[in-house]
Amino acid sequence: MKVSKLSKSILTAAIILSVAAMLTGCGGAKEDANTIKIGANLELTGNNASYGSSAKNGIEMAVKEINDKGGLLGKKLEVDVADNRSEATEAANAMQKLLDDKVDLIIGPDTSSGTLACVSTADKEKIPLITPYGTNPDITVDPATKKVRPYVFRTAFIDTFQGKVMANFVTNQLHAKKAAVYIDNSSDYSKGLQKFFVEEFQKSGGTIVASEAYLQKDTDFKAALTKIKAENPDVIFVPGYYQEVGMIIKQAREMGITQPIVGGDGWDSAKLAEIAGAANLENCYFANHYSAKDTSDKVKTFVTNYQKAYNQKADAPAALAYDSVMIVAQAIKDANSFDKDKVQAALEKIKNLEAVTGTISFNEFHDPVKSAVILTFKDGKQAFVTKIAP
Amino acid sequence: MGDNLFLQFVQQLINGISLGSIYALIALGYTMVYGIMKLINFAHGDVYMVGAYVGFFAATTANLPFFPSIILAMLATGLGGVIIERLAYKPLRHHPKIAILTTAIGVSLFLEYTTMLLLTPQPRTFPPLLPNAIYHIGGLIISFQQIVILAVSVILMILLTYVVNHTKMGKAMRAVSYDPDAAQLMGINVDKTISFTFFVGSSLAGAAGVLVGIYYNSIEPLMGIMPGMKAFIAAVLGGIGIIPGAMAGGLILGVVEALISGFISSTFRDAAAFAILIIILLIKPTGLFGKNEHEKV
């Protein structure tokens, strides 16, 4: 029969392919006694690729600095990078690949959705995972059991704080009474930020006049923006990622929406100005982890070195990834061991670590307690507005 | 407030028509290919993506202005369409329909992931080839680019209808669509006619790709999936195989999406589009413009 012949050949092809995949998969799992392997699960391609490439730079720069000073406890650091293509399912696959490669700890993913897809595996495999940029509260605390996930840490401040900061900023500095929110319905990050922003904004007497949503990879936002415009809000909160936010800002300004548009750290990318157009970014504000314009020595050295190494400006994902390596390095030093459980225990005790993105102490939820900055744009370039302490 | 609501309604109509004319442009190619081969060419949305990339490189690497860029994109995707038909569909022409349909999905994935491999999945920012003037008319906002997209799709639709109904090639297309074997016996070169159809249909998708690239100023390898599906719904809605039907279907779909987003909720937008598909298939499977039996070009 024709059909069975066809299915037989498909089966054969599938077997050959899977065997080949297994062989290549095993090839990477070499153990070297003289190095510590840091697995980096990053958004190297896809919609959030600008985070991943910055994070990769930040990690490599930190690793080089540590290795130049002789490494950690006599061993050199080595980075094993896996691409998660900015998608949650691929993030879980990349995590598996890193585990197969027998890495000692994992940095990343950088997005909340991606990280959430990896956290339970980290706990199950008992491997420390630190996300540089994942800001959703559920990452470190399991929402079902309300228990802290023992092996998961983060370098960024959390969305509860970020949402509050933005709500207070629009109430106090922009004097907004009516706000519209326009969120990315396909992102845990965006939905979380919306929740905390709305709670705080309403607590201080504001009203939400429109609540709209889009999906990742959407390109036409005019229908929802027309609706938002008709409600005449004082401010529009768009807690998305730069790719869609850029298009939203562009289309909003083209439709004559002149009100301030505000968002969170998902905006931090040079791509934002490219997509939105520099002129359209006037009167836009967002919360971020650090400002390259900060005058502290730590930031100045980091920004100069980064510029020298990669010939580009260090953005928040770069700074947070750099800090993530510094945090685990400190933990390994404190533990005086590479044992995963000892490193985990040392991570929990990190206190007053001077880092680029602020002074880091982990609280009982494995979240760093540190300040946020508010940035705006002048001619498409980021400009510092204010710094807000926790 | 009543006035405001009316203004909002008209603005949503404008938003919907500009979105719908993009669906229509892609749907035209879907419908032509279906009309002649009874094949739902799932790779059509990806041909549109390839067109956007050709236009992008014409405009950035070769630094060409609007017209040469779009014409280059149309030629490239047209030729691409002919090659796809020759290599992937022609050998299966006398096989069961399901084989050729599966192949179309294969071609679609092939185009998506080859582009991803060669050009990275990174979204690229399209250069502004057309001026982005914005007109305010009594509280309504229309941009020059929206007008161009609508004009281009209407002109192409009229041109296509003329070609199909009043030229020799059009007659050949209609003949092949009715009965390929009989047409061959009458001395019509069936291969050439099918190639021509693919050339025209794919070049329309290429044009749409460039226009969308300019309009939304961002392109990426998977950009064809959703518009391709929406255009398929538009083609079914208007009556697949019927050229004015594709145009009408595209515009209706765009307007419905805009009105749903604007007056109900933006979260229901895609659900509404697919609900339309299901309702049409249940109530009038031949589409709005379809006759009950001979839904041919």
Image: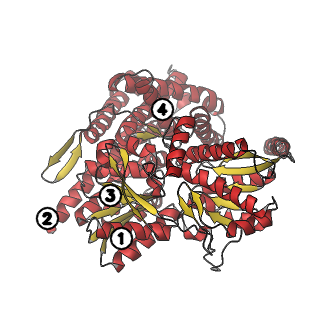
Mark 3 or mark 2, which is nearer to you?
3
Asked whether disc 4 touches disc 1, contact meaning CB atoms under 8 Å apart, the reply is no
What's the chain of the residue with tag 3?
A: A
Are discs 4 and 1 both within one chain?
A: no
Q: CA distance from mark 2 to mark 1?
A: 35 Å
What's the chain of the residue with tag 4?
A: B
Is B79 on the left or on the right of A232, as rendered?
right
- Front one among A36 and B202: A36
Vertical relation: B296 (above or below) A231: above
Q: Does the image show residue A34?
A: yes
Mark 4 or mark 1, which is nearer to you?
1
Residue depicted at 26% across the width and 47% down the height = A254
Quadrant of residue A135 within the rendered picture: bottom right
- Check disc 3 and report its element: helix, strand or loop: strand
Q: CA distance from mark 3 to mark 1?
A: 15 Å
| Residue type, mark 4 in image | Tyr
Across and down, in percent, residue B277 comes to 45, 57
- Look at mark 1 in the image and give the residue it sits on: A168
| Residue type, mark 1 in image | Asn
- Look at mark 2 in the image and give the residue it sits on: B3
- Look at mark 4 in the image and give the residue it sits on: B53
Mark 4 or mark 2, which is nearer to you?
4
- Mark drawn on residue A261: 3
Is A63 on the left or on the right of B62, as rendered?
right
- Check disc 2 and report its element: helix, strand or loop: helix
Q: CA distance from mark 3 to mark 4?
A: 31 Å
Outermost residue on the front side: it is: A297
Residue depicted at 66% across the width and 78% down the height = A147
Q: CA distance from mark 4 to mark 2?
A: 43 Å
Across and down, in percent, residue A123 comes to 74, 67
Mark 2 or mark 1, which is nearer to you?
1
Considering only order in the chain, which callout, 2 or 4, is on the residue closer to the N terminus? Answer: 2
